[in-house]
Structure formats: C-alpha cells, structure tokens
Image: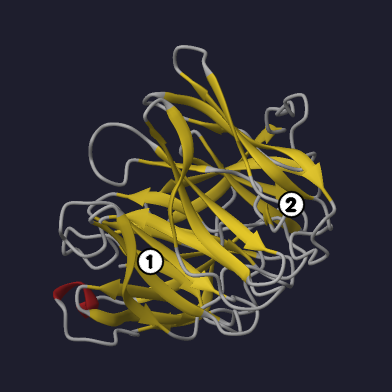
Amino acid sequence: MRRSLYASLALSVCAVAAPACAAEWHVQQIDAPARVTAIETVDGQVQVNAGGLWYRVVLQGQDVGLNFVDRLPAAKTPEGGLPDGRVAVGTRDIARAWFAEPTDAYDHGVLGDKIEASALVIERRDGRRDTVRLNADAVFEDLEPRLVDLDGDGHDSVVVVKSYLKRGSALAVIAERKGKSDIVAETPPLGAPHQWLNPAGFADFNGDGKIDIALVRQPHVVGMLELWSWIGGTLRKTADIPDTANHIIGSRALNMSAAADFDGDKLADVAVPSHDRGALRFLSFTPVHEIASVPLPAKAVTNLGLVAVENSPPAVVIGLADGSLVIVRRD
C-alpha cells in the first residue's frame, strides 16, 4: 500500500457548536500512480481511475492507499437503451431499470451530448417489463434511474430527471399504480429551456422516518441544494441551502455529492462541493446548518466516494482538477 501524504490543510472548520464539530476535518492527499480522472463506487467499494487503470481505495488507520483492480466490469447496454446510460439494479420488486429510445429532440447537451431518452424501461423481479414513454414535449435528461422506497411500503419507486423542451427540468417519481407504471408526482419544472437539476442524495434527512430527496437546482448557475419530502403522495420542498454544485457542464459524473451521517446525530447529511467547487461542504437539514466547510487544494471534478471509518463518520474521496486525489476525514 502506498503511504499517503498529509496536505497542509488541517483545519477546525465547524460552523455550529454540535458535539461532532469539536473535532478537526483534514484534507489528506492520496498517492496515485497517474492523473486521476474518475471515481465510481462498485459494490460499496470506492474505485479510482488513474491513468486509464482502476484502483480500489484502501483505508487502514491513518494510511490510505490504492490497490490495483485492473478494470470495472463492462456494463452491456440493453437493446434500444440510451447509449451512455446505465442500468440500475434493484433489491426489491424492481430488478432493473434503464433509459431507452434515444432522441435528439432536446439540444441542451449538459451531459456531454445532445442525445437523451424518451422512455424508461422497468423490469420487475418476476420478469414483467413496463415501458414509460414521455410525450413529445419532454425527455429524460438523465443517465441512470434511481430506485428508492419513498413511502416505506417495501416497493421501489423510480426517481428520474425529466426535462420539458420549453419549461426546463423537473424531478419525477415513477411508480406502479393499478398494474401499470407511470409518473405519479413531479416537482414544478424550473421554468425555461436548458435549466437543469441533479439529485444529490436519498435518505431520511429530517428525522420523520421516511426517505427524502436532496437535489441541486441548476448546479452550474444557481447552486441551490433543496430538500423534497414525500408527503401525502406528493413531493413538497421543505428546505434549501445555497452555494452548492454537484455537476460540471458536459460531464457524465452525476454523483458529486453523497449522503451519510457526518455529525453523529443519527440522521443523514449531505456532502457536496461549494458552488465554485473549491471547498467540500457538509450540510445538515436538522436544523438547516453547515456542519463544516473544508477548503480543497484544487477544484473538485469527480464523483464523491464514501469510505467507512471506524468510530467516526465516513471519509470522502474526491478527484481534483489538478489530477490529484484527496480524502476528507474527521479526527
């Protein structure tokens, strides 16, 4: 294992006087064999692409290293699927879900090209398939569906980004009703073409025992972290926090944020870069406040990866614009 280097940033950066904030947060550099270009989480393990090869992040005490794993398993695109899309694999009644029926009807290109999906395919555990097709006024401006049990009934819903050609993006929830899958709720569209949002995490953020949805509204321009809760069969915005970003224009990295308990209060929080991507912010919704803001040596550019730390909140692994790799952790 390569021995890691400590960056000069070792700061006490707590924004409130909570018990978890008495400790320091550190940025620690991880030695990488080449420029880091991507981070993915596979079966709970953080994998890092450096120089075109993949490595697994290994944490032992204060030492952090990379173990060579060759390459990620190649994912086969289902017939008719979005060429750059990903298949979501579920553990409940939905076995798989993916975007399909590519279309060039929307010219935004925020995800790297101007090909989006006009349909979503849902494959259930019993092999039955449903296809949800949008009207001609909207596309799925997304790469991978998210399978989430929003109401705690043991059945997954599918959460997606739906973009109207003339009214911008909305967050949509697709569920089975009377034997057919369809959109059962969505947030109001942002209002104009090319205005987009990106989900930031799914967890019980407010302590009501149900899964909430965190998203960043217009991460490239506005950068507002919003909390949406499933209440009475609809989505309602219950909180927001400014100065965040979880996507870069043209990138296919949609997971530049992560949900976990970072302050030790048994409720999930959100780790997300600041809007200029120069700091990593840890944010709580109970009540709304900043747990910590940790300056980074360079701008964040990759997905975030969570690494378990014994007797401490998870550490966060990030690839930076200068090609370096760092881990942000609390003492």
Alpha carbon separation for disc pair 2 and 1 = 30 Å
Q: Earlier in the sequence, mark 2 or mark 1?
A: 2
Residue 217 location (% of width, % of height): 53, 74
Of residues 165 and 290, the one drawn nearer to the viewer in this rendering: 165
Disc sitting over residue 270 in the figure: 1
In this view, 233 is above or below 169? above
Residue 141: % across, % down: 67, 56
Tag 2 near tag 1, CB within 8 Å = no
- Label 1 element class: strand
- Residue type highlighted by circle 2: Pro
Q: What residue do we see at 48% from left, 70% from top?
A: 188
Note whether residue 176 is visible: yes
Question: For the C terminus, which image quadrant?
Answer: bottom left
Q: How many marks?
A: 2
Q: Quadrant of residue 195?
A: bottom right
> What residue is disc 2 on?
33
Amino acid on which the number 1 mark rests in the picture:
Val
For residue 315, say whether it is visible.
Answer: no
Local secondary structure at mark 2: loop
Judged left or right of residue 322, residue 148 is: left
Front one among 328 and 146? 146
- For label 1, the crowd category at 10 Å Cα-Cα, with few meaning under 14, some 14 to 19 and many 20 or more, is many
